Amino acid sequence: MGSNQTVQGRLNQPGASSHKNRNRILTAVTLVIFVVFLFLADQGIILDSYGVRIIRLCGVYTIAALSMTLINGLTGQFSLGQAGFMAIGAYTTSLLIIPPEVKEQMYYVTPIQGWVRDMQAPFLAAILIGGLLAALIAFLIGFPVLRLRGDYLAIATLGFSEIIRVIITNVGSVTNSSIGIKSIPDTANIWWTTIAAALCITLVYRLMKTSYGRAFKSIRDDEVAAEAMGISLFKHKMLSFVISGFLAGLSGGLLASVVGVINPLYFRFTLAYEILLIVVLGGQGSITGTLVSACLITAGKEWLRFLDSGFSIGPITIPEISGLRMLVFSALLMVVILFYRRGLFGSNEFSWDGLFRLIQRTGARCKRLIRRGEKGGAAK
Amino acid sequence: MRILETKHTTMRFGGVTAVEDLNLYVDQGEIVAIIGPNGAGKTTTFNMMTGVYAPTEGQIMLAKKDGNLEDITGVRPDLIAKRGVARTFQNIRLFSELTALENVLTAQHLHVKSNFATAMLGLPQYKKEERAFRKRAMELLEIVGLADQADSMATSLPYGQQRRLEIARALATDPRLLLLDEPAAGMNPQETQELTTFVSQIHEQFGLTILMIEHHMQIVMDISHRIYVLDFGKTIAHGTPDEIKNNERVIDAYLGVAEDAEG
Amino acid sequence: MNVLIPSMEQFVQGIANALSLGSLYSLVAIGYTMVYGILRLINFAHGEVFMMAMYFVFYVTTLFQAPWYIAFIAGIVGIALLGIVIERAAYKPLRNAPRISVLISAIGVSYLLQNLAVVCFSGIPKQFPSVPLFQDVIIVGGVHIQRMVIIVPIITAILVAALLYLVNHTKMGIAMRAASRDFDTSRLMGINVNRVISITFCIGSLLAAVGAIMWGLKYPKIEPYVGVMPGLKCFIAAVLGGIGSIGGAVIGAFLLGFIEIMLVLFLPGLSGYKDAFAFVLLIIILLVKPTGLLGDKAGVDKA
């Protein structure tokens, strides 16, 4: 883990890359392989619909985690409000894409309001509106909460997220209260989610390369110094918070379409904890780390489903224990924060050179180990 | 021409008076030093001038571009920086996870004219600005002798270089008035000598006005035009280096224990 | 929105309920305020300590057929130990880490305990054992109330008085106050800071356990997330009163209890928003008076 970081750190520097062409080719080849993979998956050739669903969720959670990485890891403002923003995006998108007659039938406890029933938008517009609405709410919430720091900010954003959820539960004529929304069209296929995730990664990556992105990082590193250098703390925190809200809203919209059914309980603060786990494992300040971690956790969560439904290790049979899977993940969060605080990537980004150095080093270390092993064997 | 003036400025924290009735001025082009034992209220003075604290009483006036004084009491730190006041910190405060070059670039953010969308889209206007920023940042690193360290992480630099990087970063905001908080702290006599030369050099080159807090008498006496002496928040003396050297109260309160107070 | 004017009897009952709810909140809020005072940490896991106390008492009663007082004492002792274990395992290793890491660790513990409860005790709600001594309804001046509505404030008053004595008049208390003023200096002065922290967690958890037992007698449904809302609300109460101050936590807790009960009493239309209301109060207090009513430490301090 340690050597990994130093390698990454060194290669993060511009100009250190002596293999520009090689890296470009590698990137291109990887992209082509990835697109072919997506195509085959989409056609149902290499993955069944369950596998495809996992890939779709990977995209969705990447965006959600990116939203937290931006505000927490890159701007240093510990926000736990993601679940609330995702809820706004999810409900907005769902209500915009479900046909009016289907909506009407669903609201059997509290009759639906006319404008909610009639509002319609194409999917792309719907997820963007969901994102923008979440961004608007983030903007409004930002005024009071962004004056707070550290743990106070965390609890205030968590509080707002709960307020959003309580409101959703209570305005039945708009949100169908605790019954939730179902029959959400399955529009967000593998291309939608993957392209959306790719665009969001590009967006945040570009952002961090601009002067505004540097200002975000300076606030993370030292607020007092940043302010003394003429950087308006509030303005930049707000900018980051609003973009983060937009990303969370967008991911919520996509999520609704992938899972098909949503209700207020889905957007409890435990959702924010799940995203926090992704961000912490990724390294808190790394965009590529977030991507890798989001895919690992999402796939892992599905792969570990067997834990909940009972399994056997050799002769020992473990009965069905519901919740064991999430216990494993909450334990993982503890292990990472206690023993690998920098996560997979720290605040560095992936680079091909870094990967090669890592391989070389690991190779050298293996050789050394083998040689030592041989010597040991000879001595015997 | 007056560039900065404090009028009866007082700062209290709870029951403690950190600075009392401070009347200090700095004229265009001067190098002024504030000296005094630890706890005399020097850094508090800087914090009031840069907006970190709003003084409990009194005013702080800063010259506008046209030369007229403007009340900046209680103005936010970033807005004071935009008005042309830059500073360094007693306990170095670099952006730890940014490179030396990025540290300097960050300090130029207050000059950005392109709005956020222009920057995100990478439109020519922003690209041109970014190129100019990088060029300027490299020049500044050159001046402080850190050009070859541009891509090193700020906190991986040795102590002396970190101090110089902080000065480069402050210069990147294009200040009229530079506040240096113990620039020579922790330096040996040779490094202090180099710093003295360096401060005079940037003073000339950038047409800067400098206000500094310093314990090293050598650098203070060598380059400052005027000196204020603070003790327990009160101004006990004010004058040219020669006047200060011969001031009884200063000798009693401060110079006599100067050796102990260093660091 | 309709303002409902309650009858005199309802109003008196409301006051009694508010007093007992305020007492419950204070027992839990004190744990937050003490930990925050020393470690500057929102102990997110405090609500889960509360939840664990309810399960603990439940299992001691059902598995061992223990009488209620044995179960209560076992629960309180067990949970006090749990508090110490959490501190040792999850916070102590991060003593020199950035504050945010400790906060994440606290969130992690909270999340872990919730999931642990789901696995060990299942998500199906359990019924907290009933103790007629506390739950019988008595009539005081024409008002029907449960006996515990009177007992809870008395127990709280005794515990708070004992705690204030401990903090203000014993050697340990002085060490605690010193550590919350200046952690590093206290260490230099030879105070065993780790011991002080352990005891702080022990006391905080102990009070939370008492609060949880009383809570269980009043609202007997136990499920893995039962500690979350009381936990968050009591943190808010601690902030309201001024974080770091024990007296403040008690005042904040009573204030929150009163406001909540009165809100439901006078504006029943808003009762669905009851849980959101505490957060609104938090935001308001942080903006208007971030130091709280009695506190001297702020969430918006200059670095």
Image (spheres, coloured by chain):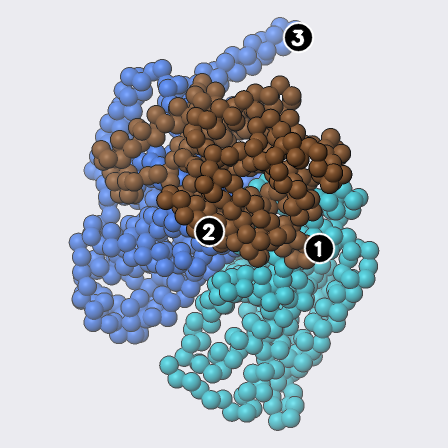
Residue B211 seen in this snapshot: yes
Give the foreground label among 3 and 2: 2
SS at badge 2: loop
Residue C238 x %, y %:
60, 63
Q: Nearer the viewer, residue C60 or A359?
A: A359
Q: Is residue C165 left or right of residue C296?
A: right
SS at badge 1: helix
Q: Nearer the viewer, residue B30 or C130?
A: B30
Which residue type does callout 3 highlight? Lys
Question: Which chain hosts label 2?
Answer: B
Q: Colour of chain A?
A: blue
Q: Which residue is mark 2?
A: B72
Give the foreground label among 1 and 2: 2
- For the point 60% across and 67% down, the residue is C293
Circle 3 Cα neighbour tier, 10 Å, few/some/many (<14 / 14–19 / ≥20): few
- For the point 41% across and 48% down, the residue is B68
Against A362, residue C129 (above or below) is below
Query: Real-space Cα distance between discs 1 and 3?
Result: 56 Å
Circle 2 Cα neighbour tier, 10 Å, few/some/many (<14 / 14–19 / ≥20): many
Q: Is residue A223 left or right of residue C132?
A: left
Q: For the C terminus of chain A, which image quadrant?
A: top right
Q: Nearer the viewer, residue B116 or B10?
A: B10
Residue A20 x %, y %:
31, 18
SS at badge 3: loop
